[in-house]
Image (cartoon, grey):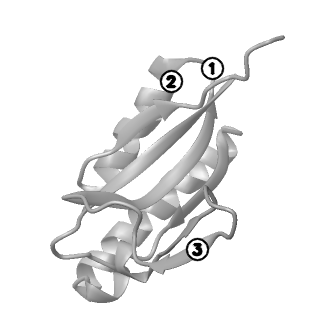
Amino acid sequence: MTLYLLSVPHDSATEPTMTSMDPAELEVALAAVGALNADLEAAGALRFAGGLHPPSTATTIDGAVDTPTRTPGPFVEAAEYLGGLWVIEADDEDAALEWGTRAARALRGRIEVRAFQDVPEA
């Protein structure tokens, strides 16, 4: 079994959050995601899921120097950012892509599906 990241891109220009969504649309989205999460749990595939606050709330810590520094804001400026995610376990890429398709339908948006790397054997 391989771990996969199902990531939810958001638009940096608007930084959407659950509090900025239309309440009726949020209710529909939460119900669809709740059903997806229940199916993932029933299949034994769900490892973790969650939504993130926008990059404007981030603090970047740079440990590449003798004394790590903290800087308010994201480490990179981008047109889109990671707004939420699922970490799932799947038998193969096809199974992960099927879960990603279901997530995209639930959110009525885009989902990126990417496998985690395995640590090379010594």
Circles 3 and 1, Cβ within 8 Å, touching? The answer is: no
Tell me where residue 87 appears, x and y as whole percent. Answer: 59, 46
Any mark on residue 91, and which? 1
Which residue matches tag 3? 69
Task: Return the disc, 3 or 2, that comes first in the chain's sequence.
Answer: 3
71 in relation to 80, above or below: below
The residue located at (26%, 75%) in the rendering is: 15
Tell me where residue 115 appears, x and y as whole percent. Answer: 53, 29
The type of residue carrying mark 2 is Ala
Question: Few, some or many C-alpha atoms within 10 Å of disc 1 (few <14, some 14-19, many ≥20)?
Answer: few
Q: Distance between the residues labelled 3 and 2?
A: 41 Å
Q: Nearer the viewer, mark 3 or mark 2?
A: 3
The type of residue carrying mark 1 is Asp
Question: Few, some or many C-alpha atoms within 10 Å of disc 2 (few <14, some 14-19, many ≥20)?
Answer: few
Any mark on residue 95, and which? 2
Task: Return the disc, 3 or 1, that comes first in the chain's sequence.
Answer: 3
